[in-house]
Image: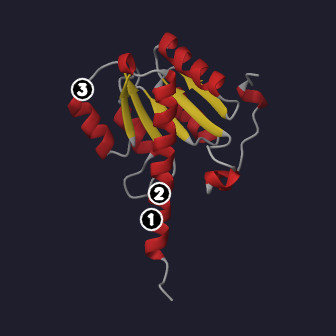
Amino acid sequence: MIRAVRDLVPFPRSVMANPLAFGGGFPHISVLMIDPNEEDRGYYAKGLRSSSTDYLVFEAGSGGLGLDLYRTHRIDCVVLELFLPDMDALEVIATIVPVAQRPTVAVVGLTRWSSRTLTDIALQKGVQTCLVKPETSSDALERGIQNAISAVLAHRTHTTSESLPLN
């Protein structure tokens, strides 16, 4: 069943604190897909929705609309086209993953253009995984999302354990 955005009730972030405690996998992953190409966005969104009922997929055709959805919904992972018509994708990344803070949201770059320079910059700015659309199936995107969320959770756990006193 595909649920409309207005029907969704956000889950508390604590649900994602220990996703493996729920018997494996990532329960109730909310994914925001920001991609101006409606055909590409629809293909990957449909693939995620059909792979599991655990995905709550939001779609945005521009960076501005994507940021509006990000601010008003609980999002676990943002899948971001790195070429946007209305704003620089690096601005979107900087809003989602502030430099001074540890990442709390996974970000997957998914672009039609293969550019090592752009990929390197996106990874330096806080994107966990970059994929190229012509080489990426919906199954590969799902693995990328799970890897990105795992990286954020591992970073959060590592940072938290470093700040705890030894005694």
Which residue extends farthest left? Answer: 117
Question: Which is more foreground, mark 3 or mark 1?
Answer: 1
Question: Does 33 appear above or below 95?
Answer: above
Q: Which residue is mark 2?
A: 154
Q: Which mark is residue 115?
A: 3
In the foreground, 24 or 122:
24
Question: Does 150 appear above or below 154?
Answer: above
Q: Position of residue 45 (x, y in %)?
A: 57, 22
- Among numbered discs 3 and 1, the one appearing first in the sequence: 3
Q: Residue at x 35, y 30 (%)?
A: 88
The N terminus - image quarter: top right
In the foreground, 26 or 66:
26
Question: Which is more foreground, mark 3 or mark 2?
Answer: 2
CB contact under 8 Å: marks 3 and 1: no
Q: Which mark is residue 158?
A: 1
Mark 3, other Cα within 10 Å: few <14 / some 14–19 / many ≥20: few
Distance in Å between CA atoms under marks 3 and 2: 27 Å
- Among numbered discs 3 and 2, the one appearing first in the sequence: 3
Inspect the image, locate mark 1, and give the three-letter code of the amino acid beneath it: His
Q: Residue at x 65, y 22 (%)?
A: 50
Distance in Å between CA atoms under marks 3 and 1: 31 Å
